[in-house]
């Protein structure tokens, strides 16, 4: 593979949700772990924030992306996982965000040949930066900055 070919390739990860999937650069995901019930927060919060999830001695917020998108979140099954994602703004009080997944994610190589804009009815949303097709399958590219900003007002 030439240098030009490798520079135009990004390693990504497709994170399965109930009815869709998220696409993130592989570097944005620290680890994927088995689901455990989160600890409830002391105060009432938005329904998309499921509670806190303990990971490597950190209490991180666990987010239901489907609920955030006002879609049916379904039930948490035995194959559920949590993707531990890096936050982007360097906020020491919120270094990670957990996203509830329906099953194990899979890696994908993103090149110009496998990704295309989604030409369907785009519903604007604060936490979705873009909708794309990856190998013919729809995927949402989340706006992690917007999600982090939404979580920054909540104390964990």
Image (spheres, grey):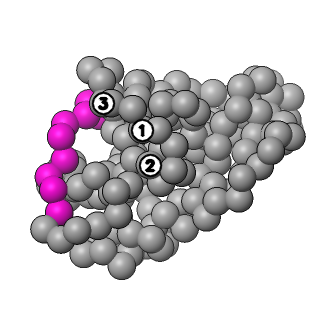
Residue at x 66% of width, y 36% of height: 139
Give the x, y percent position of residue 79.
Answer: 32, 21
Which numbered disc, 1 or 2, marks the residue that appears first in the sequence? 2
In the picture, measured across the screen, residue 113 lies left or right of residue 69, that is right
Q: Which residue sits furthest bottom?
A: 153
Quarter of the image with the N terminus is top right
In the picture, measured across the screen, residue 65 lies left or right of residue 2, that is left
Quarter of the image with the C terminus is bottom left
* Residue 66 sits inside the magenta stretch: no
- Disc 3, SS: loop
Measure the alpha-carbon separation of dots 1 and 2: 6 Å
- Disc 1, SS: loop
- Disc 2, SS: helix
Residue 121 appears in the rendering = yes
Measure the alpha-carbon separation of dots 2 and 3: 13 Å
The label on residue 73 is 1
Residue 31 appears in the rendering = no
Where does the magenta region start and end?
Answer: 32-41
Residue for badge 2: 67
Measure the alpha-carbon separation of dots 1 and 3: 8 Å
Tell me where residue 86 sits by quadrant. bottom left
Task: Say if mark 1 contacts mark 2, CB within 8 Å.
Answer: yes
Task: Say if mark 2 contacts mark 3, CB within 8 Å.
Answer: no
The label on residue 76 is 3
Residue at x 63% of width, y 27% of height: 108
Q: How many marks?
A: 3
* Residue 33 sits inside the magenta stretch: yes
CA neighbours of label 3 inside 10 A, class few (<14), some (14 to 19), many (20+): some
- Front in this rendered view, residue 109 or 137: 137
The label on residue 149 is none
CA neighbours of label 1 inside 10 A, class few (<14), some (14 to 19), many (20+): some
């Amino acid at each position: 593979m030439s240098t030009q070919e490798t520079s135009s390739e990004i390693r990504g990860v497709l994170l399965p949700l109930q009815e869709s999937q998220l696409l993130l650069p592989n570097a944005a995901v620290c680890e994927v772990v088995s689901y455990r019930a989160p600890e409830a927060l002391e105060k009432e919060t938005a329904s998309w924030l499921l509670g806190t999830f303990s990971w490597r001695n950190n209490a991180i917020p666990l987010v239901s992306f489907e609920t955030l998108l006002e879609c049916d979140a379904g039930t948490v099954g035995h194959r559920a996982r949590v993707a531990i994602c890096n936050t982007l703004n360097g906020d020491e009080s919120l270094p990670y965000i957990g996203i509830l997944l329906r099953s194990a994610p899979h890696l994908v190589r993103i090149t110009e040949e496998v990704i295309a804009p989604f030409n369907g009815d785009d519903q604007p949303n604060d936490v979705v930066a873009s909708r794309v097709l990856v190998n013919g399958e729809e995927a949402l590219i989340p706006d992690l900055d917007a999600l982090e900003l939404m979580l920054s007002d909540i104390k964990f």
